[in-house]
């Protein structure tokens, strides 16, 4: 298959002929609207732009060389406006790498940092050299180079799942950490291929979307240091080097000029199994840092455009990482839009989670905007029309927008208030019951008006940032000493409880209570309106040893230990059951129409049916969902009961019209794994309206016609 250049209609059918010679290379003016480097028949098109540069040079390197073998200065007539574009003939894309050098004014107080001696990475590079080996970086004195990538992956007749937001069950994972541990038993640990080997497991678990922590090319060696004999790296990857290039160290083998092929194969395989792919993208800052940081790309092209600068040329730091990308400048808007379109069209990505997304709504002076043009553009862009847009609706500068993030009925949010309120409630802070009731029922106090109702809230109790679910009920305080900052890093607002013993223990009572609380969290999450998300490994009690900020831990602290799956199969089975239960019951996910009983779509209950007066004194509460079932002639009724108190509480279930009765589908207080859930509906226990919610437990009931569930005679 021939290479398929982007924007193909701009390229004429007739063979292109060189018009000039530069440094012995035959050249002609290029295609100014195609950013980056693109392989065309017989030539390579190089296009780059800078607002304030006075000249531009193209540097060509032999593969993995540190010095260029050719320097081609763009002729003056190869510049239109602020864009330099040149076709270079006779290049074999497998034999060279490239970079740029730009000259221009240097005035740091005005944010102008041009340096004609420094090679620069193309902001539109589709592949970056120098970091294909994890933990290594370009040699001292060298720079990042780019490669031309063939865009000829065969997608065949593959189709994207296009699942409704409310039908997703999102599974957040780190590509390297998911399979790097030897217990993963994959052939290619720590890579896209390794993750692909785990697709049968993901299918068995039942999740419908993976949210991949950053897979853009990033510099994991940033801040590389030794602590207690261990090498610490920037393992998470929230420090982008290039927005268009996949992290080459996540590939199981070098993919010269085919970078991204393994990632595309992974995405194709996930789609074939009905699983969507959401990328965690970092457009709030780059790895260039502040005045003391490296200089490898954006600083050398247009520092005062790409970054938010103070009046005296210093960097605003709303990201907490040294610099802040100037997202609402038209040039940066264009780059971000082109980037997302690229990942959607070339990689078939299904959605994006935007790290510190509130930064994307700040003006060039840092002030919050009422209608940020970037966010509005992404909401209405036709190519992104079916893509999930998910905001982490806060930033490190103190802007917290959960419930107020500009939406246009297209953006969903990580619901940080769900996390905080449910963490408090589920560990026993029963006085949080009124807030917990709002979060479980879709946060109606937050998502009204311009928002998409229940589709706005991404509900989560754990994510990569903070305790794992196991650690949430194993530690009262963070234990981040291994990070080397004397345990001063990471949040102190964990809302956790160690169940009576800090850290690992063999005490059977403590271990049993911890498992029960993990199951409670799972049951509530899967029975909440909104879109559930949980951290990979939570389903079988994976621990980070009390470290709630393991961003630098490329080791057993962060890697998933798959031995926990065998040790905690009971937890895995409970997660699997609750995910399946959620999928089966449309009333939880949003409903289809009113049920025939006349029950409201959502109702709140104390221990007394339809008593919605939940107060700070309420220790046990119920949430009931009622709607038409998947078929118009059926009803779907689900009741979730939660008791966070340290004593048993008897509740009354709402009265059902005959021949319906309540049946117990799951009960975290059950003594044995077998009695905890009912995989076969005919194994469900009939409940005569009264039920004892065990101490610190959750139970899930569904209304069924009694005759339909009578055991076979």
Image (spheres, helix red, strand yellow):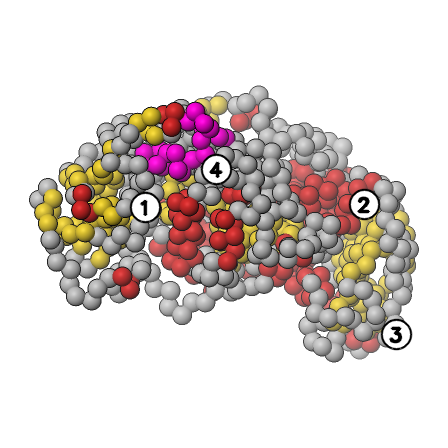
Q: If you read the primary sequence from the N terminus, does the residue marked by circle 1 or circle 4 appear first?
A: 1
Q: Are marks 2 and 3 in contact (CB under 8 Å)?
A: no
Query: Which of labels 2 and 3 is toward the front?
Result: 2
Marking on residue 433: 2
Q: Residue at x 56, y 63 (%)?
A: 163
Query: Which of labels 3 and 1 is toward the front?
Result: 1
Q: Secondary structure at mark 2?
A: helix
Q: Residue at x 34, y 64 (%)?
A: 154
Is 700 located above or below residue 546 in the figure? Answer: below
Q: If you read the primary sequence from the N terminus, does the residue marked by circle 2 or circle 4 appear first?
A: 4
User: Is 301 one of the magenta-colored residues?
Assistant: yes
Query: Which of labels 3 and 4 is toward the front?
Result: 4
Q: Which image quadrant is residue 102 in?
A: top left
Distance of mark 2 from mark 3, alpha carbons? 32 Å
**Residues packed near mark 1 inside 10 Å, few (<14), some (14 to 19) or many (20 plus):** many
Q: Position of residue 602 (x, y in %)?
A: 78, 60
Q: Position of residue 312 (x, y in %)?
A: 43, 24
Distance of mark 1 from mark 4, alpha carbons? 25 Å
Marking on residue 364: 4
Q: Nearer the viewer, residue 349 or 670?
A: 349
User: Is 485 one of the magenta-colored residues?
Assistant: no
- 303 left or right of 702? left
- 431 left or right of 58? right
Q: Which image quadrant is residue 344 in?
A: bottom left
Q: Secondary structure at mark 3?
A: loop
Q: Which residues are magenta?
A: 297-317
Q: Are marks 2 and 4 in contact (CB under 8 Å)?
A: no
Q: Position of residue 107 (x, y in %)?
A: 33, 26
Distance of mark 3 from mark 4, alpha carbons? 64 Å
Q: Which residue is mark 1?
A: 125
Q: Which residue is mark 3?
A: 658
């Amino acid at each position: 298959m021939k290479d398929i250049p982007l924007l193909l209609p701009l390229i004429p059918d007739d063979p292109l002929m060189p018009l000039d010679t530069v440094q012995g290379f035959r050249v002609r003016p290029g295609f100014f609207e195609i950013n980056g480097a693109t392989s065309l028949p017989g030539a390579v098109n190089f296009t780059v732009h800078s607002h304030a540069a006075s000249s531009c040079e193209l540097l060509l390197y032999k593969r993995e060389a540190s010095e260029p073998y050719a320097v081609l200065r763009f002729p003056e007539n190869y510049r239109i406006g602020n864009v330099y574009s040149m076709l270079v003939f006779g290049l074999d894309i497998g034999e060279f790498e490239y970079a740029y050098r730009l000259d221009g004014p240097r005035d740091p107080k005005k944010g102008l940092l041009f340096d004609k001696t420094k090679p620069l990475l193309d902001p539109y590079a589709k592949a970056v050299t120098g970091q294909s080996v994890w933990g290594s970086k370009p040699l001292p004195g060298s720079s990042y180079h780019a490669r031309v990538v063939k865009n000829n992956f065969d997608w065949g007749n593959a189709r994207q799942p296009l699942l409704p937001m409310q039908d997703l069950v999102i599974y957040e994972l780190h590509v390297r950490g998911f399979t790097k541990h030897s217990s993963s038993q994959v052939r290619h640990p720590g890579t896209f291929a390794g993750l692909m080997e785990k697709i049968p497991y993901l299918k068995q678990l039942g999740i419908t979307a993976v949210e991949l922590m950053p897979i853009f090319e990033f510099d994991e060696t940033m801040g590389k240091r030794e602590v207690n004999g261990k090498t610490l790296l920037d393992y998470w990857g929230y420090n982008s080097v290039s927005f268009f290039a996949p992290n080459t160290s996540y590939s199981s083998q070098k993919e010269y000029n085919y970078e991204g092929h393994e990632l595309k194969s992974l995405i194709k395989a996930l789609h074939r199994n009905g699983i969507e792919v959401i990328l965690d993208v970092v457009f709030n800052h780059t790895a260039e840092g502040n005045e003391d940081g490296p200089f490898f790309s954006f600083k050398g092209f247009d520092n005062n455009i790409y970054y938010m600068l103070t009046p005296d040329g210093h960097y605003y730091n709303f990201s907490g990482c040294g610099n802040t990308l100037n997202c609402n400048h038209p040039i940066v808007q264009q780059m971000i839009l082109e980037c997302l379109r690229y990942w959607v069209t070339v990689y078939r990505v299904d959605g994006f989670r935007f790290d510190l997304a509130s930064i994307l709504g700040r003006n060039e002076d840092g002030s919050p905007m009422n209608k940020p043009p970037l966010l509005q553009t992404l909401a209405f862009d036709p190519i992104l029309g079916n893509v999930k847009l998910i905001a982490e609706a806060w930033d490190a500068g103190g802007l917290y927008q959960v419930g107020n993030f500009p939406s246009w009925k297209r953006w969903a949010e990580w619901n940080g208030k769900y996390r905080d309120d449910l963490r408090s409630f589920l560990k026993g802070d029963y006085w949080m019951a009124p807030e917990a009731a709002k979060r479980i029922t879709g946060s109606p106090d937050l998502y009204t008006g311009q928002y998409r109702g229940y589709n706005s809230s991404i509900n989560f109790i754990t994510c990569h940032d903070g305790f794992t679910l196991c650690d949430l009920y194993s530690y009262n305080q963070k234990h981040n000493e291994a990070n080397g900052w004397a345990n001063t890093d990471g949040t102190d607002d964990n809302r956790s409880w160690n169940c009576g013993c800090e850290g690992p223990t063999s005490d059977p009572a403590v271990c049993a209570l911890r498992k029960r609380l993990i199951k409670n969290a799972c049951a509530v999450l899967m029975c909440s309106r909104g879109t559930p998300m949980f951290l990979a490994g939570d389903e079988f009690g994976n621990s980070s040893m009390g470290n709630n900020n393991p961003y630098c831990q490329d080791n057993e602290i962060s890697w998933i230990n798959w031995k926990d799956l065998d040790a905690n199969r009971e937890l895995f089975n409970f997660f699997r059951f609750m995910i399946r239960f959620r999928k089966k019951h449309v009333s939880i996910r949003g409903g289809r129409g009113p049920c025939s009983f006349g029950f409201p779509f959502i109702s709140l209950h104390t221990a007394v049916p339809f008593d919605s007066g939940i107060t700070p004194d309420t220790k046990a509460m119920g949430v009931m969902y009622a709607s038409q079932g998947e078929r118009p002639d059926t009803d779907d009724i689900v009741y979730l009961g939660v008791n966070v108190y340290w004593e048993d509480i008897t509740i009354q279930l709402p009265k059902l019209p005959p021949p319906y009765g309540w049946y117990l589908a799951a009960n975290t207080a059950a003594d044995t794994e077998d009695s905890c859930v009912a995989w076969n509906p005919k194994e469900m226990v009939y409940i005569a309206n009264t039920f004892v919610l065990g101490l610190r437990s959750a139970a899930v009931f569904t209304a069924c016609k009694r005759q339909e569930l009578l055991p076979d005679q």
